[in-house]
Image (cartoon, rainbow, N blue to C red):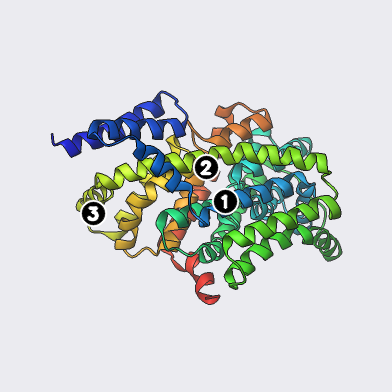
Amino acid sequence: MSSESLAILILLGSFFVLILLRFPIAYAVALSSFFCLLYQGLPLTTICQQMVKGISSFSLMAVPFFITMGCLMGSGGISKKLIALADSCVGWMRGGMAMVNIVASYFFGGISGSASADTASLGTILIPMMVDQGYDDDFSTAVTITSSCEGLLVPPSHNMVIYATAAGGVSVGSLFLAGYIPGALLVLSLMVGSYIISVKRNYPKGEKFSFKNLFKQLSVSFWALAAVLIVVFGVVGGVFTATESAAIAVIYSLIVSIFIYKGLDWKGVWKVFEDCVDTLSIVLILISTSSIFGYCLTRLHVPDLAANAIIGLTDNPIILALLLNLILFVLGCIMDMAPIILIATPILYPIATSIGIDPIQFGIMLVLNCGIGLLTPPVGAVLFIGSAVGKVPMERVVKATLPFYLCMIVTLLLITFVPAISLWLPSVLG
């Protein structure tokens, strides 16, 4: 075995061993990189250099701001207003509260950009409400966790920013626009699944549809939804960069939460900032340590080797696209979202583009695959949060989620093989 092959074995082997030993992902990435560099005899100062380089990016400055915006809006009393808006839209259907849950996640995801925040915020309100109205607790929890993945696709998603940085040269504004239709498609898919189950189990309907109530709730929720419009249209229109738009959105969210919705006081703002620091520390440590790992992969030519190996299996673009999805799905079962984006993008991105998948389309595929991974054991963070919020054993939640996995996989395949779903809106708006 050559020296380079042994270095690759040390890097990847130690990484997966540490993952199986339940090390935190950031430590697993850093330690495996450390072992690899040590074997190669490289100076360990490279670790510090690459960590600093990994987070010294103007584009990545948008990530802390988007997370802060989501925390402010999520704690500012907006959840109930978005639920009321969703209820006025789809609550009249059979299984109305399940539909409300799904649509509310689409609205809330456009503000938080986080599946975990969506599940924790909306789940604490909607799961007990659904159970009180006669819905099964495992079904209520399954709907909540699967619909939370809509927020990963709907802008402003900080995961899109991370992907744009990892891929290099991909427009954040185009990624933001590209997420709307796939997010809406996921909503429709989950609603169809929920409707079939609701009819079968005879879940209740809500109140009759009323345009008056819809416009009333829309006027109340407008201030929250405007934050998304500021970000998306500001970036797409070239008024400001993604980072500048995120900073403006934080100030706007602060004003809305304190002075308009009055869901926060200044004491509460400091508590929100403390929670943001906790979240940001995790994200930035992951990004910095993944930068070392990415450096080792590039130095050892792992992306080229992986691309040649996968393409060597077949030259059929359909099978290769399915293989890419399968690899990302398996990674999602054992790793968290940010490190998958940072580590897998340099390896799989060249393969995707070589078979004609647009970089923007691949970004949507990657994010949705990671979202499905958040719902799958053994590392599914959103699955654990939903189980805790709904007070339902994880085994029952997984069983209840099986039909929704199918809905999400159908959506993923449509996004993979129908490029227009992701690319139509960015192309229309330039």
Q: Is residue 130 visible?
A: no
Say left or right for 423 vs 312. right
Going from N to C along the chain, the mark reached first, 1 or 2, is 1
Circle 1 SS class: helix
Dividing the image into 4 quarters, which one contains the N terminus? top left
- Are there few (<14), some (14-19), or many (20+) residues within 10 Å of tag 3? some
Give amino acid for label 1: Val
Q: Nearer the viewer, residue 99 or 160?
A: 160
Going from N to C along the chain, the mark reached first, 3 or 2, is 2
Occupied quadrant, residue 429: bottom right
| Residue at the (44%, 30%) spot, across then down | 27
Give amino acid for label 2: Leu
Q: Is residue 376 visible?
A: yes
Circle 2 SS class: helix
| Looking at the image, residue 331 lies above or below residue 416 | above
Residue at image mark 2? 284
Between marks 3 and 2 in the image, the one whose residue lies nearer the viewer:
2
Residue 63: numbered disc: 1
| Looking at the image, residue 361 lies above or below residue 347 | below
Q: Are marks 1 and 2 in contact (CB under 8 Å)?
A: yes
Going from N to C along the chain, the mark reached first, 3 or 1, is 1
Say left or right for 42 vs 369. left
| Residue 336 % position (x, y) | 48, 39
Residue at image mark 3? 311
Give amino acid for label 3: Ile
Residue 283: numbered disc: none
| Residue 146 % position (x, y) | 58, 44
Between marks 3 and 1 in the image, the one whose residue lies nearer the viewer:
1
| Residue at the (30%, 44%) spot, across then down | 297
